Amino acid sequence: MATLNLLVLVCFLYVAFLFTIAFGADRAARRGRGTWLRSPVVYTLSLSIYCTAWTFYGAVGFAARSGLEFVTIYLGPTLVMIGWWWTLRKMVRVGRSQRITSVADLISSRYGKSNLLAVFVTVLAVVGTTPYIALQLQSVTLSFAAFAANEPSGTDLPNQQSIALWVALGLALFTILFGTRNLDANERHHGVVMAIAIEAVVKLFALLAVGVFVVWGLAGGVNDTLARIDASPIAAWEVSGSRWVGLTMLSAAAFLCLPRMFQVMVVENEDEGHLRTASWAFPAYLMLMSLFVLPIAAVGLDVLPEGANPDLFVLTLPLQDGRDGLAILSFIGGFSSATSMVIVAAIALSTMVSNHVVMPVWLWITGGSAVMSGDVRNVALLARRTSIAGIVLLGYLYFHVSGGGTALAAIGLVSFAGVAQFLPALMGGLYWRAANRTGALAGLGVGFVVWLYCLFLPSFGPSPVMPQAVIDHGLFGLHWLRPQALFGAEGMDPLIHAVMWSISLNTIVFITVSIISFPRPVERLQGAQFVNVFEHSGSPPGWTGGLAQSEDLLIMSQRIIGGPQAQALFAAAAQRQGLAGYLPEPSPEFLQEMERELSGSVGAATAHAMISQIVGGASVSVEDLMAVADETAQIMEYSSRLEAKTEEQERTARQLREANQKLTQLSVQKDAFLSQISHELRTPMTSIRAFSEILRDTQGLKTAEKSKYAAIIHDETVRLTRLLDDLLDLSVLENGQVVLNSQTGRLGPLLDRAIAAAGVDAETFRIERDRQAEDVMLTTDLDRLAQVFINLISNARKYCDSPSQVLTIAPKRQKDRLLIDFIDNGSGIPTDHQSMVFEKFSRIGETKAGGAGLGLAICREIMARLGGDITYLPGQSGAAFRVTLPQPFADTTPPVSA
Amino acid sequence: MGKRVLLIEDEPNIIEAVSFILSRDGWDVKTHSNGHDAIDAVRARAPDLVILDVMLPGKSGFDILQEIRADGELATMPVLMLTARGQVKDRELAEQSGVSRYMTKPFSNADVLEVVRSMVAT
């Protein structure tokens, strides 16, 4: 006879047993003993919180309603454990290296420690998990009710609500006691994990016991059981392929994303190697859990009266048969499933709520000064504990309000679909560098809204929030917005419909927005850390700080992680830096280590915010920028190398073009020069040949004629010689082969010499000179200078078209130069010819009397060699040439005013 | 009666030499020594033959030749180009411009006489 009182007593005893286990495990761990606590078996068993009361009771109900479909719930996690072992390992590695405290922390940390994202994930997780906690409370209440209904004495049925409340309070107390002993959420909760492992064994044992009883006790052996299954409606359930695939994928996604699964799989993970064991052991566990589901369902449908709740077959079958002991064991199994789920879910969610919602708000309210003055440790603990109570209470409220009407499995799947929205951001964060915060936020937002609209709200049935009209005709009467036939996708299973739309829209938006938006530097760095976690166990964004801040940091971390631990951390860091005492240099490495430590307690975003408040550095340090810059530089370098190559080719091409142009120009010049030379040589030779033939061939020439023609021949020969001399002279000057013979002398005598050499007739050609100005000492190649003067003087004589020719020679001093102007009284050189006069073979005037047009070209070359210049001076009374000499004046003659 | 020849040349000694040679052969030699108004001189004197230098002050012999050929009445005028520019391209340019005969300086007196005679033979 199972009385309710006995049941309550058993419950208390069981809970007391769990307390003892947890306490003992915690103590053993604290004392450094209990390596068995860290065994892969414990890890694997702790994963069994996946099997909640929903699985324990609900799977049978599921099977009774939908046949083999219940298998999908086990198939998903099995596939993940076996096929996605690599992903799990990556998640665990990232979680450990970044000291991740929750799934929200992981996503926030990956996307640039964005607290907004963390809050979003937290809210989504709370909304998704609350019904699930309600579900657990409901299952406990229902199981109580089942006992009560079976009570022959008809004892008063205890109020369902009050049972749920008591259970909720007990769970909250247990969770607070063992879940928040350490502030560091990243530290393992050995007690809790151990208790969960025990509960895993209990629930498996209970379910197997009921299964054995059903098969051999009730059905009469394996063959009979199979026959009953064949006969039951279960065999007739048709299997819908899309629903199978959809449910399997959904449970696989949920297995990765559920906050409580993340808690036991990543946060509580001791050793990556444990995953190896879990990858086969956990599927085996699931297989055992599902082994007797079908027989129990089939026999239950067969034996129990019509209308019996199939969700409670596990319990009602032994009760029906009067096996109270077995029934109590079964009850304990269900109780275990419910409690372990609530405990872990509450720990996981409270970490998220306190780290991402309460602490940031508190930090914001106190304006950061609290980091120094307040007791952060107590605040964090209080936040964590309040959150646990709040979450469990929220679950109770949900249960209270909803009245616990809906079938258990349905709520479970709705909840799964909710948390599955994390999947794109989570997987994208682990494998896709370009994934960024904006994309994650957008994807999550869209997925959440679609889930809410298509699945969560309609799951309550017609309600004020989601009236029947909206379900039938869509929001605002828009047909394509019908929550269960979005965009006209009719005829689908509502759950699969919602999962399909929410996940695919979530993924599409996430990818699209990630591609079109640009990540911040921190995101890029974290992205690299996460995606390449196996390549470098490197450093997240670094810090820089001043020495004075070390003490502030110590004070702060003492408040967060506790005095002894903080002091040990600081002392160790100081020792590593070769310093005595407790205050290490706040080097980037140390600050980083500290941030990791703190993030274990308060989450990455909050720890980052706390340290930045003390260190005061921008959250993006120079190192961050350098790292990002490095990455960019590599890309830039490649493209700039290409660019440089192109530039170099361009430069070479330009040089070649220039050279070619020059060569072409030279070739043209050479042609012109040769043509000129040819002309200048042929002209005198023509006269010479013509007249010598005349002298030779003509009979009876007069003597005067003979001597005239002979004189012409002579003159032309002289002209030819002079031309050749000039050419040679010019060639020597142009090639720079000329040897200058520096002498010192006065300008006056030099001009005398030049005038005499030019052979001018003083009668017809007057030269005006300034004897005083000519009294200048020169140090240069006087012979070459004289050659220039002779040229200018004879040019004036030849080309000055004045009837009475006058040449004025005017030397002037100008700063450190000596200017000597030669100005005649002719009509000068026309403006358009002035630039030409110094070119070879250029000749002004109509006759060719005299030279070949090389004189001024030679003058220009000579002056260039002497370091001076010769220019045409426009705007004078006649043709005017200015000779400029650089002049280190040797004498003290005062400058002559112009 | 001598045929009339117009020598357009700017080098005094060459003018003297050519004048001497042709005069002795019975030609009526007129000379002109710049390029500017050479075409006017040709029209004014309407000679039987023009001897044309290339490097002339004011206008090149090629230009003058083209002007002669462009003039309807002078289109058939025999023109002997006598130049110190002996390159192939100069000869080509002269032929394109419609020269009758082309000789390079320095020349043999006998050759000049022979060519000049042949050009006004009929």
Image (tube, grey):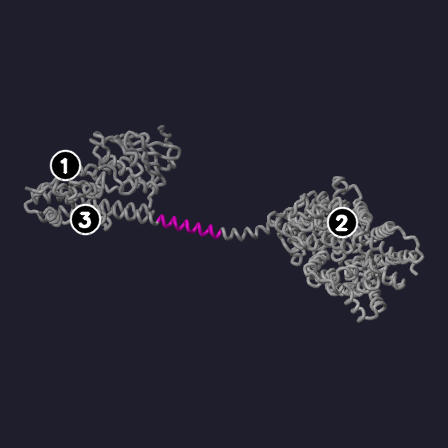
Pointer 1 indicates a residue of which chain?
Answer: B
Q: Among all residues in the image, which is located at the extreme front?
A: A306
Q: What residue do we see at 26% from left, 42% from top? A: A841
Q: Which disc, if any, is residue A408?
A: none
In this rendering, the count of numbered labels is 3
Question: Disc 3 vs disc 2: Cβ atoms closer than 8 Å?
Answer: no
Horizontally, residue A697 falls left or right of residue A33, namely left
Q: In which quadrant of the rendered view does residue A295 lie? A: bottom right
Q: Which labelled disc corresponds to residue B104?
A: 3
View extreme (top): residue: A897
B39 relative to A294, above or below: above
Tell me the crowding category of disc 1: few under 14, some 14 to 19, or many 20 or more residues within 10 angstroms, Cα based. Answer: few
Residue annotated with mark 1: B44
Residues A750 and A410: in front is A410
Extent of the magenta region: A644-662
Distance of label 1 from label 2 (alpha carbons):
123 Å
| Disc 1 versus disc 2: nearer the observer | 2
Mark 3 and mark 2: span between their CA atoms? 117 Å
